[in-house]
Image (spheres, grey):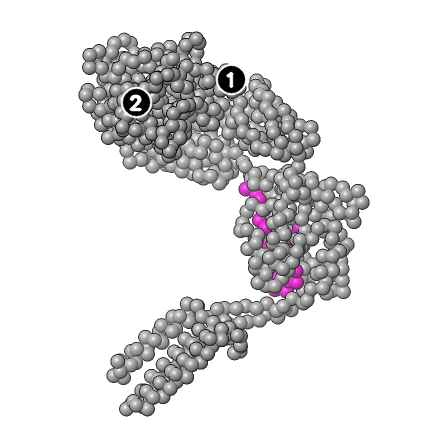
Amino acid sequence: MNFHLHHLHFSPTLPVLITGLVAIVVVALLCIIGYRRSPNKKRSALLESLRFFITLIVVAMMWQPEWLTVIHPTTKPRIAILWDDSKSMQTTDAELPEMFSPKKEIVSRAEFTKKILDSDLWNALSAQGQNELITRAFSTHPENTALQAAAGTDLSTPLEEILEQETNLRAAIVISDGDWNLGQPPVSAAQKFLLRKIPLFSIPAGSKVRLPDLDLLAVNAPTYGIVGENLQIPFTIRSSLDREVRTTVRVRDEGGRERTKTITLPPNKTTYDTILWKLEKEGSSTMELSFPTAQGELVPSNNARKFTIAGKPEKIRVLVVESLPRWEYRFLRNALSRDPGVELSCLMFHPQLGIGGGPDYIEKFPDKIEDLAKYDVIFLGDVGIGNDQLTKEQCTLIRGLVENQASGLVFLPGPQGNQFSLLDTDLSDLLPVVLDSSKKTGIVETSASPLALTSDGASSLLTMLGDTEEDNPLVWRSLPGFYWHAPVERAKAGTTVLAVHANRSSGNYGRIPLIVTKTAGSGKILHMGIDSAWRWRRGVEDKYHYRFWGQVARWMSYQRNMAAGQRVRIFYTPERPSPGDTVTLHANAFDKNGAPLQDGKVSLALTSPSGSTRMLDLGKDDNSWGSFTGRFTIDSPGAWKLSAGIVDDDTKPVETTLLAQTVDLEKTGQPARPEVLEEMSRIARARMIQPGALPDLIKEITALPEPRPLENRIPLWHHWAVISTIICLLALFWIARKFNGQF
């Protein structure tokens, strides 16, 4: 039920209306009775009048009052035509209707839009001055290359703006491919058109079938690599061809050196693959990954991507700690000591054999931070705490080394079960697996059991034992099996399982994880759950055994090795940021003696791609490892130069380059999304018009009624001013009753 009182509009339901009227009558009677019984007629009259007035306001609020103002148009009715000018409109997949091209020519979506806008059909809408036509482009792709990556399509905002700006809007028409990636969902704007009772028509541009294309979606190459070593360059290709394609992926550096890999791309699927590359020089190299244009492919411009990789020299310092000279330890020591890129130190905790002898052995575990901080990787064999082994304090030092200085930690458990005593130390959280305490000495197999690579393991450089990616699964299947494995129940959350027990499961957790990795702070962790990798030497001598442990040492020391030999080391995440990302900087600083910097400050000069430089002071972390942290936001694509040094120190600062790659929101070749336009028009009580039916659209708009006057409604029943007024009046009424001697 609706009724008006001048500008006040009420819309109560019938029961609420009757309830309110009854309340008014009852309160009026009570006010009269109270007035007659009161000895002070004057005060009582004021008090009862206030009571009745409050009742009227409360009842009125129950009837949901709105303050209604009507704005009558003073201009001609307007028809708005909004057209999409984003980058995706450059896609050539729009079929011109027969009225514009008898041969139904295929043109770009932008050309299609222009043909429609230039049509004489619109003249009928403005004939005899009955309507005024306005056209407006939205989401125009910027010419400034620095802004193009962030440019996208916002369908909602331009529609809402036209509603706010126009008070006499008769209809609106949107010409677009429907592909939006910015702003609110377009249906939100359509709902506002519905409330204003303004029809929103749409004209789709482009085909909803993806163009035949091979699109190089991403190249996720590492930022750095070791000179002389292979590294993996992952890439992603999406095929929208309806047939299988065999193509050759090519990686080429700026010197012309290249490597190729032939792959098969299934039809209409996304393929993830990698290609190996060997770095041969120090410093930054600009590289390109590409593949040739396939037969029938219509968008060849997305078949190549450039990226940079910095090559660094190698020097890895490794500490191996063990309590028993078992076979795994002996062959691990041999493998690392013969590796020219590794500087090895060993420590033996054996009650009879002592600390061990030889040039690689140290006399005791480093108790000082500056002595321990030199190691890039620590291998912990079958060792624990107590019994002249590690102390809890030393375990705390190891954790700090990993988390704060990007060192690697390898757990190599053994049949003595000493690793269980580490669960009572700070190393417990670093262990990437949950151990089974009911089987502390591990599980002995009656026959040789093989390892099985997981999907993560199959794509990891850490487990790349074959000479090629194709050979690697065959190599792992041919490796000799193991006869003992650690009592592992399951992998912890946030870890990566590379290999599992091929034959044995652990309760409800699936296959027993045996090679597991994780990150901890800025460092890396590896758990090796078998003690017979040395058996991999059978028939091939040292080939696979040495290759595996060499890759482990390099993978674990990756970040530290990139900054070796500097008083300041810089790590940053993400390694390949995009414009708009916030980069977190981690710096480790050392004094002249090589110990972590205790007293001092680290400052960083940040040079943007445009050449402007600003200083950034890094804050000291609350620990004793000389760790400093800072953040900055990438606001433009290109090469950002970082130069970090210790304040008031004459040592040469460390320099590195961060490449911010653009990932354009808008791409050509993407399929149109007419379903978005259709939903918008349906919600706004209109419809999507196919290009060939433009004359019908003109007739529908011509037949529309005159735009209704614009109504502005202010709900009063929940407005803060009304509620505040009621509260104040109630307080006044209560105070007045007290003064009148009433309770």
Residue identified by numbered label 2? 442
Q: Nearer the viewer, residue 15 or 406?
A: 15
Three-letter residue code for mark 1: Asp
At a point 45% along the width and 18% down the height, the residue shown is: 476
Question: Is 74 placed above or below 262 here?
Answer: below
Examine the image and state in which quarter residue 288 appears: top right
- Give the magenta range: 150-175
Q: Nearer the viewer, residue 706 or 285?
A: 706
Which of the two discs, 1 and 2, labels the residue nearer the N terminus? 2
Q: Nearer the viewer, residue 663 or 496?
A: 496
Secondary structure, mark 1, is: loop
Secondary structure, mark 2, is: loop
Question: Is 30 placed above or below 309 here?
Answer: below
Residue 325 place in picture, x, y as percent: 28, 13
Residue 41 place in picture, x, y as percent: 32, 90
Badge 1: few (under 14), some or many (20 or more) residues near its Cα, within 10 Å? few
Three-letter residue code for mark 2: Gly
- Tell me the distance, in whole angstroms, between the alpha carbons under discs 1 and 2: 32 Å
Q: Nearer the viewer, residue 336 or 513?
A: 513
> Which quadrant of the figure contains the C terminus?
bottom left
Residue identified by numbered label 1? 471
Residue 151 place in picture, x, y as percent: 57, 43
The mark lying in front, picked from 1 and 2, is 2
Residue 294 place in picture, x, y as percent: 66, 28
At a point 44% along the width and 39% down the height, the residue shown is: 582
Q: Is residue 580 magenta?
A: no
